Image: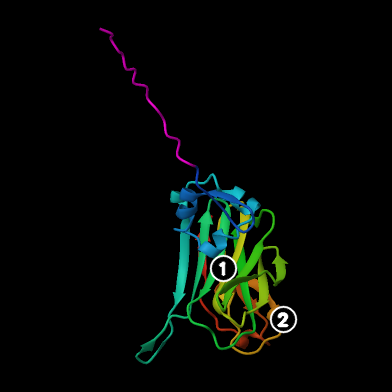
Amino acid sequence: MGIFFILLLPFIVKAEECNIINNNGVVIDCAYYNDLLEYYDAKLVDNFTQDEFDSFKNNDLDDIEIESYLEVPSRAFFQTNYKRIEIVKNGSFITMSLTWLKNPVVRSHDVFAARFTGSVAVNGNTVFRQFYTTSSSVMISTTASKKTFSNGFGYSFKLSNYSDMEIFITYSITGSGSIYTSYQHATTTTSLTDSKKYTLSSAGYGNVILFDSSVENNYDNMSGVHISV
């Protein structure tokens, strides 16, 4: 009578790798992609450049810091949310965002700026993006006019005539101190030239944007936010 021996060998089933390739060809692990959506808008993640992704991909997402302000004006018993400004610190990678929660009536030249204190400085380039929806398509515009100062920078840009508008500015920093950010909406028709009549000061709108007296009444004086870095 023959004796049969059955050798039981362990086997390993290798899970198929899951990656997402964004609009700029950046390869992002699916699990990490979903984690990023806890902190960033999907439209921004889908358009990160390789340089942007490389600047934070090794960071611990549990250490991300977020400061935001929701503008909630009220009229008698009627209350509505217009827009939200936010700043996200992910290591040295900074994201400033403005989300329109209700479409504005006036679409002219708005201003989005950052003021630095201490030894904070931009390391490399700043990236401006305006997202909006037309029909069923998400569009992106990078058209804006930048002003650079010794204590920060700002962008003037024409607000889209479409809906679901979100504006993002991303950049990396060096040094330590604080970042103050402000978004000012033009409530009356304002030219690009007039929108650039400002400096950066704690005495300005949102503790950032100090407009020339000839144009300061063109803007809504929304509160800003700041974060320590």
Q: Using the image, tell me which numbered label, if any, was put on residue 192.
A: 2
Write down the residue under mark 1: 181
Q: Amino acid at mark 1?
A: Thr
In the rendered image, the quadrant that contains the N terminus is top left
Tell which residue pokes out farthest to the front in this image: 1
Q: Amino acid at mark 2?
A: Leu
Whole-percent x and y of residue 193?
A: 74, 81
Q: Residue at x 65, y 66 (%)?
A: 128
| Callout 2: SS | helix
Task: Give the class, few, some or many, for how many residues have Cα within 10 Å of label 2's Cα (few <14, many ≥20).
Answer: some
Closer to the camera in the image, 89 or 175: 89
Q: Residue at x 61, y 48 (%)?
A: 54
Chain part drawn in magenta = 1-16
Q: Is residue 164 visible?
A: yes
Task: Let me know if residue 200 is in the magenta part.
Answer: no
Q: Residue at x 57, y 60 (%)?
A: 46
